[in-house]
Image: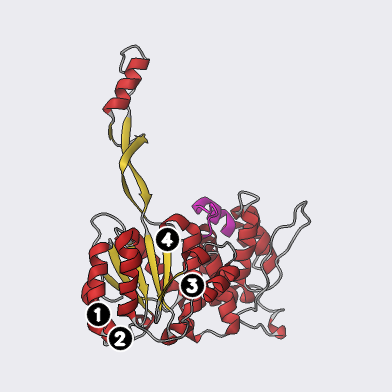
């Protein structure tokens, strides 16, 4: 990957973490790097001076810099109040000692390139250092919650004419039409329901999927629900609302009794719909089912429950980790039974595919958006 692409990708990661990194700041960052060179410390300070606009940005900037450019200690300066710093992680690529005196931008370019490669790697194929690096990258994600138009309207500079607000303005000005008031429909969060298969066949993906769910819950705790599927249904929304991801994952693991067990998707979906979905959790929601479709129960039962779920939900997305592999064919009994009732079948095997899943969540949450019932 070209070095500039890696630097722009780093700025994009900061923007996803919630920092105000607009095009002007990114251009200033690239210009500063061009002046100071690609030494790691120089790039750190160039980004810190051009991309950070608030003291609260520093912890997020440090975490994103370590996640994107490797595990070396980021430069620090004495401050009055210590800033929280996450634990260090192993670098994805090793640099020979003999190469360190050569091209100065080689370690930086390799780190940025490896971070992008890791985003596309299958989660089941990652080693221990790569999984640690992936956890850092997941921690700085800031998925924007989907929204929907609300019934109420609010004042706006553009929109339809608000006759009542205009009349009130005229009364305050003695009957003179001083200014026309306008309004537009406000927006409310769209509920998102994540159903995560934690059976034995999905165990290589379960940790990353739950961490992704933790990020989504933390962004919008009031409008996100998370359930695990296996031989039984378990609600883990409350456990994943904890701020620390490790504590949240530990609490979720204690709550789920059927990790790496069997798969009875039809029965567990029936429990979900009877206890939670029919009572309002699934009504008008975007439901995302993370599963490989290996069904040990009755496939007819799964088809019936998916039909019920589709009638209640706004949209149903099936994220299948095997769908991201070349030559995949949806021949599993669960997938075949569910396909007629799914709006979108997408891949769910990598960090990049999880970001694509969320883009479909936002797209299918809008009025008029319909699924294509096809595989990507």
Label 1, residues with CA under 10 Å away: few <14, some 14-19, many ≥20? some
Element assignment for label 1: helix
Residue 131: say if magenta.
Answer: no
Label 2, residues with CA under 10 Å away: few <14, some 14-19, many ≥20? some
Q: Which residue is mark 3?
A: 210
The residue drawn where x is 37% and y is 16% is 172
> Between marks 2 and 3, how big is the CA–CA gap?
24 Å
Mark carried by residue 297: 2
Q: Is residue 209 left or right of residue 75?
A: left
Label 4, residues with CA under 10 Å away: few <14, some 14-19, many ≥20? many
Which of the 4 image quarters holds residue 202? bottom left
Q: Nearer the viewer, mark 4 or mark 1?
A: 1
Q: Are dots 4 and 1 in contact, CB under 8 Å?
A: no
Q: Is residue 131 left or right of residue 305?
A: right
- Tell which of 253 and 293 is nearer to you: 253
Q: In the rendering, at what x and y percent does residue 376 appear?
A: 31, 75
Magenta segment boundaries in residue numbering: 17-30
Element assignment for label 2: loop
- Tell which of 53 and 109 is nearer to you: 53
> Between marks 4 and 1, how big is the CA–CA gap?
26 Å
Q: Which residue is mark 1?
A: 301
Question: Which of the two discs, 3 and 1, labels the residue nearer the N terminus?
Answer: 3
């Amino acid at each position: 990957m070209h070095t500039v692409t890696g630097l722009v990708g780093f700025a994009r990661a900061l923007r996803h973490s919630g920092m105000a990194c607009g095009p002007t700041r990114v251009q200033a960052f690239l210009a500063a790097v061009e002046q100071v060179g690609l030494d790691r410390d120089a790039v750190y300070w160039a980004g810190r001076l051009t991309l950070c606009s608030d003291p609260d940005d520093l912890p997020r900037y440090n975490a994103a810099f370590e996640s994107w450019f490797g595990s070396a200690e980021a430069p620090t300066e004495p401050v009055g109040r210590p800033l929280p710093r996450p634990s260090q992680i192993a670098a994805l690529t090793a640099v020979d000692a003999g190469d360190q005196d050569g091209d100065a931008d080689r370690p930086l370019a390799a780190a940025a390139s490896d971070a992008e490669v890791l985003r596309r790697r299958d989660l089941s194929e990652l080693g221990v250092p790569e999984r640690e690096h992936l956890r850092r990258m997941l921690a700085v994600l800031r998925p924007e919650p989907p929204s929907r138009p609300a019934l109420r309207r609010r004042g706006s500079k553009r929109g339809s004419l608000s006759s009542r607000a205009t009349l009130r303005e005229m009364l305050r000005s003695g009957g003179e039409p001083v200014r026309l008031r306008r309004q537009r429909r406000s927006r409310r969060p769209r509920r998102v329901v994540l159903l995560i298969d934690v059976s034995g066949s999905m165990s290589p993906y379960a940790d990353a999927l739950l961490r992704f769910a933790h990020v989504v819950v933390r962004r919008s705790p009031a409008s996100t629900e998370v359930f695990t599927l296996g031989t039984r249904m378990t609600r883990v929304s409350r456990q994943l609302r904890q701020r620390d991801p490790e504590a949240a994952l530990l609490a979720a693991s204690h709550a789920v009794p059927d990790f790496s067990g069997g798969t009875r998707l039809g029965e567990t979906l029936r429990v979900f719909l009877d206890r939670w979905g029919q009572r309002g959790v699934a009504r008008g929601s975007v439901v995302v089912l993370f599963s490989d479709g290996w069904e040990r129960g009755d496939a007819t039962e799964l088809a019936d429950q998916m039909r019920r779920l589709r009638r209640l939900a706004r949209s149903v997305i099936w994220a299948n980790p095997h769908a991201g592999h070349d030559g995949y064919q949806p021949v599993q009994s669960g997938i075949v039974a569910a396909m007629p009732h799914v709006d979108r079948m997408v891949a769910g095997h990598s960090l990049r595919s999880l970001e694509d899943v969320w883009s479909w969540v936002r797209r299918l949450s809008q009025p008029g958006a319909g699924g294509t019932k096809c595989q990507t």
